[in-house]
Amino acid sequence: AITCVTIFCGFVLMISTSVPGVSPSICVAATFVGLVADVLDGTAARKLQVKSKFGASFDQLADLTCFGIGPGIFFTRQGLSQLDGDGLSWAVILTLLAGYAYVACSTFRIARELIVHDCTRPLYFVGIPTNLACVAVVPLSAVFPGNPVLPFLVMILSAMMVMPLKIPKGLGVFTVTDTEVVTSCGKRKD
């Protein structure tokens, strides 16, 4: 059920392009709610010891919705909204290319995770996680929608998602195992 919250948050990002009244600030909030739901989902699965291939695959597809496709569409909408009347300018082409690169790279990254790890959740990421890239893309797109540097940043983050570098889960702040997440300071001794 927690994973469905993540999917809903991605859905909010996608419908923001066509439903009047879904403001960029709502999309930023949905992104952070989706991130919290994603963390809670993994924590609950470890605590309850209910890990399965289906659950791992479902979680990855929810991540694709909320942190891959939704942000790519949102970024593109935000960028194009600032370029009204420009026709097919370089700025429009660059925005479309960056939005597509983000969606394609996040899809590639998650497909690679599903295949390489046989639908299990490894203790490391290959490339930066989609949720980490999303935390930069959505707020920056909301606050600086017409910034000419933003498409380049989105393309750099897209490339970083598919780079073949192993990054430990917890990013050095936490130690993640199959059963728990511990801060890098360790557990408190009683």
Image (tube, helix red, strand yellow):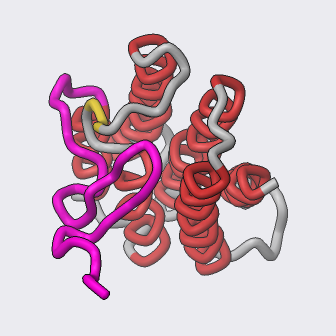
Main secondary structure found in the magenta portion? loop
The residue lying toward the viewer, choosing from 14 and 174, is 174
Question: On screen, 135 above or below 168?
Answer: below
Q: Is 79 situated left or right of 18 in this image?
A: left
Q: Quadrant of residue 95?
A: top left
Was residue 173 drawn as part of the magenta stretch in this picture? yes
At 30% from the left edge and 48% from the top edge, which residue is drawn?
A: 169
Where are the magenta residues, as a range? 162-190
Residue 78 lies, in percent from the top left, at 53, 60
Q: Quadrant of residue 158?
A: top left
Q: How many marks?
A: 0
Residue situated furthest bottom in the rendering: 190
Q: Measured from the top left, where is residue 136 in percent x and y?
A: 35, 63
Q: Nearer the viewer, residue 150 or 82?
A: 150
Q: Residue 171 colored magenta?
A: yes
Residue in front for this viewpoint, 37 or 30: 37
Residue 127 seen: yes
Q: Nearer the viewer, residue 88 or 76?
A: 76
User: Farthest residue toward the front?
Assistant: 190
Q: Position of residue 151 (x, y in %)?
A: 31, 49
The residue located at (50%, 19%) in the rendering is 114
Image coordinates of residue 125 in percent, x first then y, are: 30, 37
Corner quadrant of residue 139: bottom left
The residue at 57%/68% (across/down) is 36
Q: In the picture, which quadrant includes the C terminus? A: bottom left
The reply, left or right, for residue 158 in relation to residue 74 is left
- Is 31 left, or right, of 100 in this rendering? right
At x 43% / y 21%, what residue is drawn? 108
